[in-house]
Amino acid sequence: MPTLIKPPGSFTDELLQPYRQQGDVPADAVIMAIVEAKGHEGLRPLMNWLADPEAVSFDSQGPQVLRDFFETYTDLPTWADTRQMAKGMTFFQKHAQQIALVLGCFSLPYCYLGANGAQVLWLTERIKNDTARRLHETGEWIFSVNDPREWNTKTAIFRTLKVRLIHAAVRWFSLHSGRWQMVWGYPVNQEDMAGTNLAFSYIVLRGLRKLGIVASEAEEEAYLHHINVIGFLNGVSDELIPQNLRQAYLLDRAIARRQFAVSEAGQGLTRALLDAIAKQGSLALASQSGSQRPEAVRNLIAGEMRFFLGDHYADWLGIPDAPVEKRLAGLVGRLPIFPNKKS
């Protein structure tokens, strides 16, 4: 098991650019082996199994290469501190409702600002055509990896390795779609994976601060460490895992400088996300307090996104400048961001 490579004091273009052409060698090798053995059609049943949140154990009759992958990569990195991880999970559970709100209205659209990285989600249509289902999958995974009981049974690790293989399959499909442009970088490349890891860690902490939630530096560092362990299990290179909040800030700024731009993909993905949250939110609020117009709920969500992102980035993503106050936490906080989860 590799030891943690200390990230640099700054994340330069010279460091990050090579990572745009790198995927995840072990996970990619699994997908290639299955394709070589069964053809590309062999990936369809695999994808269905990987995307099933109820499938939390491995079928011993599966391909040997798949069994080998799960057996090889279930260990935590040598630098993982289980006490820090426990504190990070306690922090999540303490603020689960607010974190769900931040993830839906800040972290996910923040990822879509990466114009090149957003192309893979746009072209594979995993988000835009079935957004509610993808939110459900994301919610299942997020709550799993923040549940100590699921770490005790290794279910959290199993779920994360499934996500890792989904990314590898998406890479394969994108590269063989005839539509992928290498100017965007490798699909689901290391730089974009590092940015996504930040979106679930450092950006969550930024969002909580904007909500006025006061946390100690120790609590924030513990949460960052916990998500970093998950990022490692998900295939993020050690060199792109920030060891502290300062390095997380520097990496975030470097990726934003390099990758954030206006794009059709980013705007389309944000629109699909906004519509999905508004639809399920209007249904939930109607059951709680009577009829709620979907348009009004959509405006509330758009206002919340603008509150987190700021008008500059919100304009880039095409988020409506909704005719409501930009911060209506009392109502928006009651919306279920992830279906079937108490967010």
Image: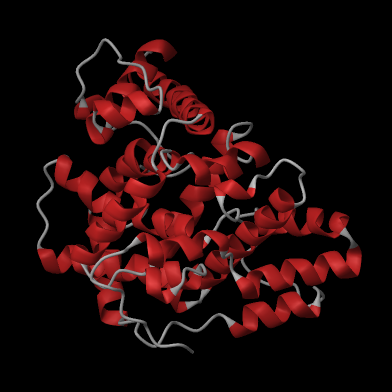
The image quadrant of residue 220 is bottom left
* Residue drawn 79% across the image and 58% down it: 43
- Colour scheme in use: secondary structure
* Residue drawn 50% across the image and 49% down it: 138
Outermost residue to the front: 14
Residue 245 falls left or right of residue 53: left
The quarter of the image holding the C terminus is top left
User: Considering depth in this image, is 18 or 322 the residue closer to the camera?
Assistant: 18
Q: Position of residue 114 (x, y in %)?
A: 44, 43
The answer to whether any part of residue 125 appears in the image is no
Rendered view: 41 above or below 33: above
* Residue drawn 30% across the image and 42% down it: 102
Q: How many dots with numbers? A: 0
Q: Position of residue 191 (x, y in %)?
A: 45, 59
The answer to whether any part of residue 278 appears in the image is yes
User: Considering depth in this image, is 310 or 82 the residue closer to the camera?
Assistant: 310
Rendered view: 329 above or below 282: below
* Residue drawn 31% across the image and 54% down it: 254
Residue 77 falls left or right of residue 101: right
Q: Position of residue 238 (x, y in %)?
A: 41, 76
